[in-house]
Amino acid sequence: MFVEGIGDAECVRRVQRGDTDSFELLVRRHQKAVFNLVYRLLGDYDEAAEVAQEVFLSAFKSIQQFRGDANFSTWLYRIGFNHASTRRKNLNSTQKRQIPLEGTEMIADGPVDPAKSLEHKEIQQRVQQALDGLDPQDARIILLRDLQDVSYEEIAEILDIPIGTVKSRLHRARQALKTMLAPYFEANRKAS
Amino acid sequence: MNCEEVQKYLSDFVDKSVDVERFQEIESHLAGCEICSDEMAGLAECRRLVASLAAVEPPINFTTRVMAQVREAARPPSLWKHWFFPLQTKIPLQATALV
């Protein structure tokens, strides 16, 4: 039976006892976060779809190893990074398919200015390109903190590093991203 | 705090994850230092840009595809495989035993 109100820990316990259907709730609950993390790491929609499926399948196959001492999402993200890392090495950067521009519509309360909407989409692509150019370790930490709003403590668990290292790596990663986006900042400054 | 010390904590400052006393020291330094202030603004803007990346929807049949693979993985091996696969490994071993 499919019950929305069950927490992750209880879902996992049910799956561990052989209730495969309970895994569907975990998939529905976490698919968007996992997919977005993987997509922003790989920069390719179709690859992200495949890898995200692999992440959940891996999680299911090794579900008995999940002890519940960390959040299920922490464990999923760790699996996600492992799979994305492997796939990224094999990915040909010239064949990347980004999401269609229609997939990044601004959410607006009133009528959307087409010029602003286009500008917003261009910025999004520029940021994605900058993320693609970062060292994978830097990209991971920025995506966890700035995109997924994961706490320092959880990042430390996911990446298996001390909190102090999380902070210093995050700072370094943001500086690297700032350098990658320097032409955009410069163009903005000249325009204003 | 001097510039070198302040810049070490700028990311934490942007995240508002420094203690109150340090936050005030940094704020006070930034009010009078254009270099550190620009650096902080740049880091804050990067954070804002990443945070504003649009959430992408997974493919429409994502859950269905995952669960199909999950259910396949959960199936016990078929009787055919159980009986015939072990038999295929048994024959070579028995053959070597005869030799």
Image (cartoon, coloured by chain):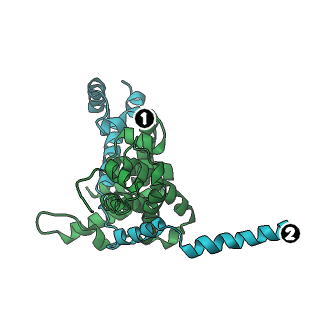
Chain colours: A green, B cyan
Q: Nearer the viewer, residue B83 or A84?
A: B83
Q: Secondary structure at mark 2?
A: helix
Q: Amino acid at mark 2?
A: Leu
Q: Within 10 angstroms of label 1, few (less than 14), some, or many (20 or more) residues?
A: some
**Which residue is at the front of the view, A104 or A129?**
A104
On the question of residue A17 being in view, the answer is: yes
Q: Amino acid at mark 1?
A: Ile
Query: Can residue A171 be seen from the camera position used here?
Result: no
Local SS, label 1: helix
Residue topped by disc 2: B98
Most extreme residue toward the right is B99
* Total labels drawn: 2
Give residue B23's position: percent from left, percent from top.
28, 29
- Residue positioned most to the left: A110
On what subunit does the disc labeled 2 rest?
Answer: B
Task: Decide if residue B16 is on the left or right side of residue A169.
Answer: left
Picture quarter with the N terminus of chain A: bottom left
- The residue labelled by disc 1 is A163
Q: Residues within 10 Å of mark 2 (few under 14, many from 20)?
A: few
Q: Nearer the viewer, mark 2 or mark 1?
A: 2
The answer to the question of whether label 2 and label 1 lie on touching residues, with beta carbons closer than 8 A, is no
